[in-house]
Amino acid sequence: MTTATTAAEPLEFRGAAPWRRALRQHGWTIAVWLVLLAMVPYWRSLSEQGFEFDLQALAIDALPLCFAAMAQAIVVISGGIDLSIGSLMGAINVLSAREMVDMSFRQALAFSLLLVLLAVLASGFTGLVITLTRIPDIVVTLGMLFVWQGVALWIMEIPGGGVPLDYSDLALGDLGTTGIPNGALVVFAALLLVWVPLRWLRPGLAIYAVGSNRNSAYLSGIGVARTRVGAYLLAGVFTGLGGLALTASSGIGDPNSGATYTLNSVAAVVLGGVSLLGGVGGLIGVIAAAYVLTLSKIILLLRGTDPNYANVYQGALIILVVVLGGLLTRKTRS
Amino acid sequence: MSDNPRAVLEARGVAKHYGPVVALRSADLSVSAGEVHALLGANGAGKSTLVKCLTGVIRPDAGTISVAGRETRARSPMHAARLGLSPVFQDPALVPDLTVAQNLRLTGSSLDSVRSQLATMDLKVSFHELVGDLPLPILRMLDLARALTHDPQLLILDEITAALPSDLAERVFNVMRDRREHGRSVLFITHRLAEVIAICDRATILRDGSDVGTMSPQEGGEARIVEIMLGPEAARAGVEASEREEAELPAAAAEAAAEAPAVLEVDELQVGGVQGISFTLRRGEVLGLAALEGQGQDELFEALAGQRRFEGGEVRVGGKAFRPRHPYDAIRRKVVLVPPDRLLALLPQRSVRENVAAPLYNSPRRWGPINMREEGRRVRKAVDALQIDMRAARQVRRLSGGNQQKVTIARWLASGFAALLCNDPTRGIDVGTKRQVYGLLRELASDGGAILFFSSELAEFPLVCDRVLTIYGGRVTAELVGAAADEATLLQAMHGLELDEAVA
């Protein structure tokens, strides 16, 4: 075994063709949006209302789930899971409805900011407990689920409270003549403001890194615990917005309003192409998935399906789509 | 070691324990400016631990580290890079689910300078690729290019060439020469002695967690390096081996063994890094496999135990074709595995009895009530044979490592086996238990068992084995008689070097 001293030949590593690479990296996101688009004609054929009206209704229906799913996606991408998102949303919902009843629009806006901050702190606390005690995410957040449920009931035992009319309009209205519902605008504004910069800057990449492979992330110089807490803090922003969205769209506070959002957010995350193992996926697909889930519920309602069966269909749809998606990604990989 | 005024890095008395296990006893290392310095040692000598201490991945228990004459200690790999020590680790430090560009942005590396570093190595890689889609050698080169962008005083390469084809390895050597010409230093960890002689100015050798010498590799060559790597214990092991040869294995018996029927016949097997290995394991013998880390032995064991599909070649058990698709298939044919990590095989929360009895019930035909008396009898027999300490028997995880290892062997005693595949069965257990394991393996063989035995401790081969095969680069490089398999000979063959006719 001797080491030759001849000059090395130039070597170029050629990966897959660019279109194939793009399909691998963004295929799922594109597919979920296509599924959403494909559902539209069927939805239109069933509905007797005008398109603009229906679009408005869809945006309002989907708004809390969009935020819950974005919060869940961030935690899952960082390698965790947060089962307390729904109940924290419920707590924010009742607190806002109780306090905003007598407020002016401006006061309500300022108070909203405070509540989002509160949600951020609450979620960050959860993250801190997880990283400090090294107890698995699922255990700590399951505990927090009950804590926030209790807090919500303590704040308001039965549904009540209210919000200024202008405040509800944030979710219910539309932007003058454009016909684009505010509900959708709010979601995309939040996405642009919070997520897009993070997808391109170090802190956002760090969230992906710790979810993908903690050891590699550590060797790359990432503060793993810090990043995981950061993911929970960021998720808190969306959880807070989700709670406020519940208040704005329903106009009241209900201590049980958040209950369904935890598991639905996990469903949207999985459907949206985020791997539960962490490190894979993005928020754009997850938003589409939240709309798909909401729209499928609306469609089943329009068809007059028994709501109990509707859940069966929806559950089957999630499994079917994820299995198909998994098979397709495996195909493009090989 | 005297103070070296030109030292870029000076480590003294660096030590690291993990519980009772000493990973690094007390290591000194001094790297001068403008030299390529090799760090050598057998498996488990402490090379990687020392590198991790130097680069802030782990915190040493004791010792001082000076960088460019000033005493500091890197708190993290990033801090090490700021101090001028850039490591390229054995595990790639690139996050698989991000693209190359995102990974570089993550560490604050400039994309352009990484690209130009790659260009000087005549490499071109698309930065839009997901890291998880790139082959391992390319990732090592990317890691190297990223480390070079810091223009480090000391570049630390931990077994970088192990995963590289020769043309890429050659590029790494060129980088090392280039660093030296620019007055920078390289610390190079490798198992390949030929590389050390070709390129390194000095070499520090570790043995059992301490440094045992710094030398110029060109003087004395490979033989001298191997001698220092082995130390005086090699001589002692040699004596023990010859004693055993006289006492336990007369030449006649060895010849008789060669006539015994074949239990496991492996013919040109290909799987993972294994590129066509053939051997025959006969009744009543212990066949040793000696190899450096990552030469394909793990894949070989996994394939034979049914954990991995064969990619080519044939295997016969008892003369009939054997192509297991699941560990169940292998166990049914009585080909059983003792894996290197005990906890892979054990049910740590359950009792010794359940652990030993587990394979007795793996056939669906045995569903229904368990014959507790029969089970108790078999388990007791195996436990007695192995002298397992039953004081903490209610949960296997509470047993000492040695006793746990005995449990993994005991389960196959209780269920019976034709071929026992032992992948490093004595890893991390104490000397007394090791001796019991050696004795047990010999006994099992003389009772007609066939045993395949890999160990990372070379001194064990002459004590345990009738024959020894050495593997390098996924191929068998030599076959030795057990008693002749002293460490020096083994090391030579394990490094892929030619043996003298007399030995082989």
Image (tube, grey):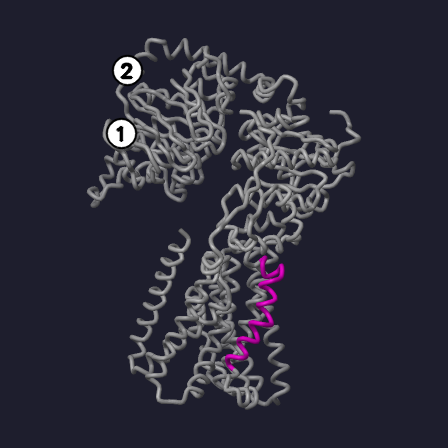
**Residue picked out by circle 1:** B317
Q: Which mark is residue B455?
A: none
Q: Residue at the spot x=38%, y=55% of the render?
A: A331
Main SS of residues in magenta = helix
Q: Position of residue A140 (x, y in %)?
A: 50, 61
Using a 10 Å C-alpha cutoff, classify the residue at mark 2 as few (fewer than 14 neighbours), some (14 to 19) or many (20 or more): few
**Looking at the picture, does residue B258 appear above or below residue B111?**
above
**Looking at the picture, does residue A236 appear above or below residue A328?**
below
Residue nearer the viewer, A9 or A224: A9
Of all chains, the one bearing label 1 is: B
Task: Tell whether position A21 is magenta.
Answer: no
Task: Tell whether A318 sits left or right of B145.
Answer: left
**Residue picked out by circle 2:** B259
Residue type, mark 1 in image? Val
Task: Tell whether B431 sits left or right of B194.
Answer: left
Residue B419 found in image quarter: top left
